[in-house]
Image (cartoon, grey):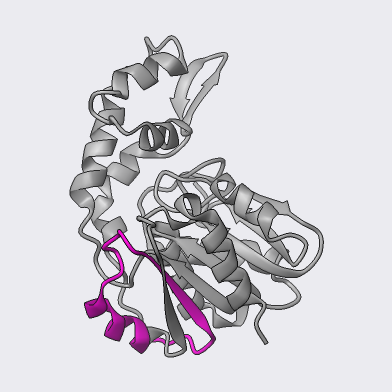
Amino acid sequence: MSDTPRLYTREIGETGERVVFLHGLFGQGRNFTQIAKAIQPRLRSLLVDLPDHGRSDWTEQVDFVAMADAVAATLRADFAAGAPVHVVGHSMGGKVAMVLALRHPDLVDRLVVADISPVRSNDGGEFEHLLGALATIDLATLGSRGEADEQLREPIPNDTVRGFLLQNLRSSSDGFAWQANLDVLRRDLGRIGAFPELDATFDHPTLWIAGERSDYVRPEYAPTMRALFPKVRLVTLKGAGHWVHSEKPEAFVSAITTFLLAD
């Protein structure tokens, strides 16, 4: 395996300021396709598959510093070669975005962190359950995606969550396989829940978006957030849970465009 994983990216739009989107755990860059289309032509987007997800390379362990450095290398090679870009990250991708801004501030103009905080997340049990459910599917005997959906219906009754997870299931002439590196992600859930200690600050404008019905952004996390990102402002999207961009897309688009395009 290469020390720096190759990251799959996709551009949407040809005009406007440039913005990079980083997805959450089990996600892919394409999760932000509708958002990227909605912010055209004012903003041009780069959708990134993070390591161990989507079409990007797998790694031997989850490491936010290594992930951020891989994103930085990808941006330096092309999308941010001429000037810094805006970065939007949700959940795990928000942690990567924060580490990217702290370690490579020359690459980041404005930062948006969606429904996550620079602290340890207490969601290991939930994700352990989801990954455990996926592990029960015998890919060698699986006949169809619908069959996988049916097998997961009892352990994961939420249709939206089940469908989101099953986007990682790929079929080929050799049968079915998981596109995400589920074994490593499951083993390293503790690392995914944590946040690295970095002796740095990012003094550019930062927007912190919280879902009203989510507990990933709490008042007690604000001092830590302000210590790392002194120019942070918090916006709470009413009625939204953790998946702020998919649950309240119009409000999310309004919040990020107002922030990213402000003088």
In the rendered image, which quarter contains the C terminus?
bottom right
Is residue 199 visible to us here?
A: no
Compared to residue 25, the image places residue 66 above or below, namely below
Magenta range is: 199-227
The answer to which quarter of the image holds residue 254 is: bottom right
Give the percent coordinates (x, y) of residue 57: 52, 45
Give the percent coordinates (x, y) of residue 114: 44, 65
Which residue in the rendered view is the most extreme toward the right?
A: 14
Q: Residue 118 vs residue 65: left or right?
A: left
Q: Is residue 130 magenta?
A: no
Q: Residue at x 39, y 49 (%)?
A: 25
Q: Is residue 213 magenta?
A: yes
Q: Residue at x 28, y 37 (%)?
A: 131
Q: Nearer the viewer, residue 234 or 120?
A: 234
Give the percent coordinates (x, y) of residue 196: 32, 71
Compared to residue 98, the image places residue 33 above or below, namely above
Q: Residue at x 58, y 77 (%)?
A: 259
Give the percent coordinates (x, y) of residue 124: 21, 51
Q: Nearer the viewer, residue 209 or 170?
A: 209
Q: Residue at x 49, y 63 (%)?
A: 89
Is residue 237 visible to us here?
A: yes
Q: How many marks on residues? A: 0
Q: Nearer the viewer, residue 43 or 258?
A: 258
Q: Residue 86 vs residue 189: left or right?
A: right
Which residue in the rendered view is the most extreme toward the front?
A: 239
Q: Residue 122 vs residue 250: left or right?
A: left
Q: Nearer the viewer, residue 72 or 92?
A: 92
